[in-house]
């Protein structure tokens, strides 16, 4: 925290080295008559909107503005701006908006006074352009000889400042405070006028989260500290702290800014305290030689390093130890006394964030980055919080879920976020507010370099600041242009900084100067892959890793934006939107669900799809943790992304709150610092096979685990122990891929004729460290025989209709091509959940969110299942068409239901029963008609057939021929 103190005017602009010396000395006695800043926070700032850009030509700074607004805050928070309409000038790439507004089914939501945007959250008001803010303030008499700085912690976007009608410059940083040197202001009343323009000032990309409406929204205003700060003619600037773990030293460099006109001797005093508050170094730097002695005062001077006394307390995710550096600038008077001029206190940590081959290290210890994204999603305000309390809550939630890393996607957070991460031990990846398609353009690059320098000067001392990039997924006029420009950018920072690692862009490209690489390749589903992805096209297993891929590189590889698995909307969440944004997109989704008579199932859809989402994230994360030598992963996301078509990809909502289907502890079991891993070639077995699993431990606890006692256990769905054992204890070093042992368990002892779901768990004795995997064991011999009471048919031909007419039972398994699809928006189901969403991916498959069923239904009595999709369902869902059951009357539901995309909300299913044609009909679109070697499909067939021959088979409702004709093709 910075404070400014009294003193006398001092001379010429100078730049001196601030460094720690080899001897420990006491601070020189100095007068401490410091003056506090004046806060300009108020409910009564004067304000006017400048829609026509007339303010500058009409000199609005010279007159009193007529309106009122509250600062800190935004126009939207004060209810100022325009009503939302189809002509709102949104700040985001205009992808498919014309199609959106033309869609007939959405026209009811684009009416005056009732505009609801389905692609992102709807702000209460909206304005893009210039607006003017003004207030009067009083300079106290004790500031008579002071220089004054105006500090605007976070303004959006460009600010222009006038004091008493005189211009004082402008600023357009998206990431750091806007600061203005106002010079000396006479005691008394003054007028401050600020023009803020939130139109695009630099080509950062309209989807960049620093400005886009997809996330924070393009707000107009100022948030955080708005202050007038007094200081003497000299003050400390650009304080840079470089802790060095290997030689236990710290280097402190600074600039001293002063005004021309007088001369005086300056002395700099330093005090370093450890996390307990103990002083570990004090030093006084004597005044520099007088001008003309050959000493150059200007950019490029280096600090002096000094060993720190005592044992270093290092900073990392496990022990976020923080040191404090206090730097005091004093004037040496003629009588050898000193007068305090300025003081600056900075928090820092001793940590070395580096690489070793393809791995990251922290203080020389291998580290795996287990990260998620923060995309500037703050629905209550539309801008990021500047108080440490909210950021501390977010960091604690992140770590409770087992993660240690946070990437800021195309934006940079305020100081409070860094402060909270410093305290909690979270590794930040910071980006320069960009997702640009014009990288390499000279004008843009000039802005980028300036913005990057602002960020590093403002936040570079924070130990949490570990990685630095231009921004997200770069592009340019040509590949060579943008790659050359980015490589030069990376090289620029490589030469200037060793406090953090630098790479070109998130997602791509590989560059010669990159110190690490973020790539889209190592994950279980890629953008555009659809049903060809591993998780949709290959039977489930837990063996796959990315070793061959990551070892193509010499630098660490982080997998880019893994996951993106969707869940059904939580309509109850809308009550939380009590601020500037509303989830009116959820209203649209709810309307379509109600139209299809399933509103009462919304909660069930959420929970079932959430369970599927969780198991997909688990496999995504474990695939990365199984990869020896991999650098880490960045999820998209731990919490929801409300824009880009509405991407409900989080197990947490946009407020970082749980949705109720997985706890932080459960999530942390597969994403934490220590994770047991089991490599299984498959998840489905028969009783004549052997369960084989190679068990490993990923240990990123920061230290070796001394001979842990590790055991495995096989339990059934009722929690009964089936089998178990222990592995021989041996030391587990830091890293992954450490073999604990192998399980080889013949399953012939499970001679039961019933299929079972089992859970294999691996735990460390005496800890809460455990992980588990569901498997299924089916009887070896399951009859394919169709009972005489049931006719199994591919078509409702004459024989089938005769059986029904006589009151008999028919199992209809239609040919895949006989299952009717939506001619306008064809349905493509899959095993996995929706990837990102359908609206923003060109309707990428799959279009579904998993199954919902009642395990207690007698048709499923011999088929072990949960209410939701689990891995055994892959065998049934793979290549099976899903039936569209909108022809059903309200209240009728299938036995096995499929959850549709929330924008369509069609009633879907794979298995249903009904009275039809005088008999009892079961219709199943799983491919059960032929004998199958697949034990899952065979078991489902047996369970259905046995149900149909029993007295329990008594459908409750009747289906008409017209209804059936809307579902399948009839002869």
Image: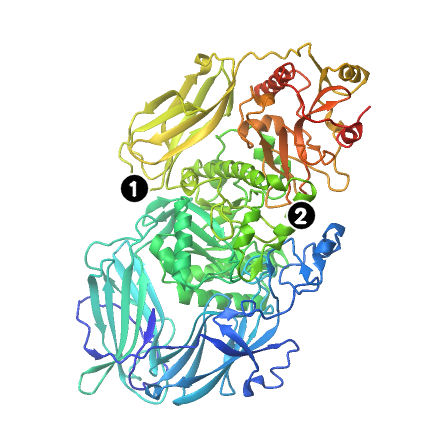
- Residue where numbered disc 2 is placed: 591
**Along the line of sight, the residue nearer the viewer: 76 or 835:** 76
Q: Position of residue 770 (x, y in %)?
A: 37, 33
Q: Earlier in the sequence, mark 1 or mark 2?
A: 2
**Along the line of sight, the residue nearer the viewer: 607 or 297:** 607
Q: Quadrant of the C terminus?
A: top right
Residue with the most extreme front position? 956
SS at mark 2 in the image: helix
The residue that appears at 17% across and 87% down in the rendered structure is 335
Q: Is residue 840 left or right of residue 865?
A: right
Mark seen at residue 703: 1
Q: Position of residue 573 (x, y in %)?
A: 54, 50
Of tags 1 and 2, which is closer to the observer?
Answer: 2
Q: How was this image coloured? A: rainbow
Q: Position of residue 302 (x, y in %)?
A: 33, 68
Residue 968 can be seen in this image: yes
Q: Quadrant of the N terminus?
A: bottom left
């Amino acid at each position: 925290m910075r404070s400014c103190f009294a003193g006398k005017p001092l001379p010429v602009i100078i730049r001196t080295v601030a460094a720690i010396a080899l001897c420990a000395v006491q601070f020189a006695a100095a007068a401490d008559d410091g003056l506090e800043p004046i806060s300009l926070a108020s409910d009564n700032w004067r304000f006017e909107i400048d829609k026509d850009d007339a303010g500058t030509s009409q000199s609005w700074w010279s007159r009193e503005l007529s309106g009122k607004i509250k600062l800190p805050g935004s126009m939207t928070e004060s209810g100022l701006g325009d009503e939302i309409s189809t002509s709102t000038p949104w700040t985001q790439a205009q992808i498919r908006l014309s199609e959106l507004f033309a869609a007939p089914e959405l026209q009811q939501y684009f009416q005056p006074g009732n505009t609801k945007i389905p692609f992102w959250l709807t702000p209460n008001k909206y304005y893009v352009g210039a607006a003017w803010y003004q207030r009067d303030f009083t300079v106290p008499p004790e500031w008579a000889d002071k220089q004054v700085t105006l500090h605007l912690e976070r303004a959006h976007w460009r600010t222009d400042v006038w004091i008493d009608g005189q211009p004082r410059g402008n600023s357009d940083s998206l990431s750091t405070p806007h600061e203005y040197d106002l010079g000396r202001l006479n005691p008394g009343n003054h007028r401050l006028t600020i023009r803020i323009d939130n139109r695009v000032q630099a080509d950062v990309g309209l989807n960049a989260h620093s400005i886009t409406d997809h996330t924070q929204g393009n707000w107009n205003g100022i948030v955080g500290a708005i202050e007038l700060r007094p200081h003497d003619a000299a003050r400390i600037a650009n304080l840079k702290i470089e802790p060095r773990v290997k030689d236990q030293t710290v280097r402190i460099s600074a600039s001293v800014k002063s005004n021309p006109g007088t001369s005086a001797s300056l002395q700099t005093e330093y005090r370093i305290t450890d996390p307990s508050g103990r002083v570990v170094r004090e030093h006084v730097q004597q005044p520099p030689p007088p001008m003309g002695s050959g000493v150059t005062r200007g950019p490029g001077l280096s600090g002096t390093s000094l060993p720190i006394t005592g044992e270093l307390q290092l900073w990392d995710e496990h022990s976020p130890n923080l040191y404090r550096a206090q730097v005091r600038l004093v004037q040496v008077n003629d009588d050898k006394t000193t007068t305090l001029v300025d003081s600056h206190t900075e928090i820092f940590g001793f940590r070395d964030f580096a690489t070793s081959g393809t791995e990251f290290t922290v203080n020389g210890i291998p580290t795996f980055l287990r990260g998620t994204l923060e995309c500037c999603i703050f629905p209550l305000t539309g801008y990021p919080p500047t108080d440490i309390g909210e950021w501390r809550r977010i960091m604690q939630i992140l770590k409770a879920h087992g993660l240690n890393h946070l990437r800021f996607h195309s934006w940079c957070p305020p100081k409070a976020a860094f402060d909270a991460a410093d305290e909690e031990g979270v590794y930040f990846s910071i980006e320069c507010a960009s997702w640009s398609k014009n990288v390499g353009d000279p004008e843009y690059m000039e802005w980028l370099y300036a913005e990057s320098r602002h960020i590093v000067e403002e936040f570079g001392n924070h130990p949490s600041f570990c990685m630095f990039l231009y921004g997200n997924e770069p592009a340019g006029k040509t590949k060579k242009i943008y790659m050359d420009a980015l490589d030069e950018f990376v090289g620029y920072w490589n030469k200037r900084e060793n406090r953090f690692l630098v790479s070109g862009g998130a997602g791509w490209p590989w560059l010669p100067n990159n110190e690490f690489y973020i790539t889209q390749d190592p994950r279980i589903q890629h953008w555009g892959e659809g049903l060809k992805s591993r998780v949709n096209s290959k039977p489930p297993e837990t063996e796959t890793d990315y070793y061959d891929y990551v070892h193509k590189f010499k630098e660490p590889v982080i997998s880019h934006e893994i996951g993106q698995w969707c869940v059904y909307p939580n309509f109850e969440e809308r009550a939380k939107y009590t601020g500037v944004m509303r989830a009116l997109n959820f209203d649209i989704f709810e309307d379509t669900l109600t139209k299809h008579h399933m509103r009462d199932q919304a909660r069930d859809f959420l929970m079932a799809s959430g369970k599927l989402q969780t198991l997909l994230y688990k496999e995504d994360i474990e695939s990365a943790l199984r990869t020896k030598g991999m650098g880490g992963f960045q999820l998209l996301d731990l919490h929801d992304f409300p824009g880009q078509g509405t991407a409900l990809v989080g197990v947490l909502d946009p407020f970082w709150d749980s949705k109720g289907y997985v706890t932080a502890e459960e999530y942390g079991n597969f994403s934490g610092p220590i994770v047991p891993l089991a490599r299984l070639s498959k998840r489905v077995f028969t009783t004549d096979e052997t369960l084989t699993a190679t068990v490993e431990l990923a240990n990123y606890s920061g230290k070796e685990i001394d001979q842990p006692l590790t055991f495995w256990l096989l339990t059934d769905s009722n929690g009964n122990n089936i089998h178990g054992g222990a592995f021989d204890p041996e030391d587990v070093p830091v890293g992954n891929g450490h073999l604990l042992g192998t399980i080889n368990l013949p399953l012939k002892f499970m001679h039961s004729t019933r299929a079972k779901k089992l859970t294999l768990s691996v735990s460390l004795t005496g800890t809460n460290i455990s992980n588990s995997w569901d498997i299924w064991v089916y009887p070896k011999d399951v009859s394919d025989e169709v009972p005489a009471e049931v006719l199994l048919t591919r078509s409702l031909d004459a024989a089938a209709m005769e059986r029904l007419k006589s009151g008999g039972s028919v199992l209809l398994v239609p040919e895949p091509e006989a299952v009717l699809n939506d001619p306008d928006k064809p349905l493509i189901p899959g095993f996995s959940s929706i990837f990102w969403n359908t609206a923003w991916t060109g309707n990428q498959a799959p279009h579904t969110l998993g199954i919902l069923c009642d395990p207690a239904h007698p048709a499923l009595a011999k088929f072990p299942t949960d209410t939701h999709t689990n891995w055994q369902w892959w065998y049934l869902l793979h290549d099976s068409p899903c039936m569209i059951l909108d022809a059903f009357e309200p209240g009728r539901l299938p036995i096995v239901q499929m959850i549709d995309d929330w924008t369509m909300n069609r009633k879907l299913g794979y298995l249903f029963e009904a009275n039809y044609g005088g008999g009892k009909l079961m219709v199943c679109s799983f491919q059960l008609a032929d004998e199958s070697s697949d034990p899952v499909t065979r078991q489902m067939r047996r369970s259905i057939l046995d149900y149909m021959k029993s007295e329990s088979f008594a459908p409750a409702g009747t289906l008409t021929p017209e209804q059936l004709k809307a579902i399948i093709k009839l002869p």
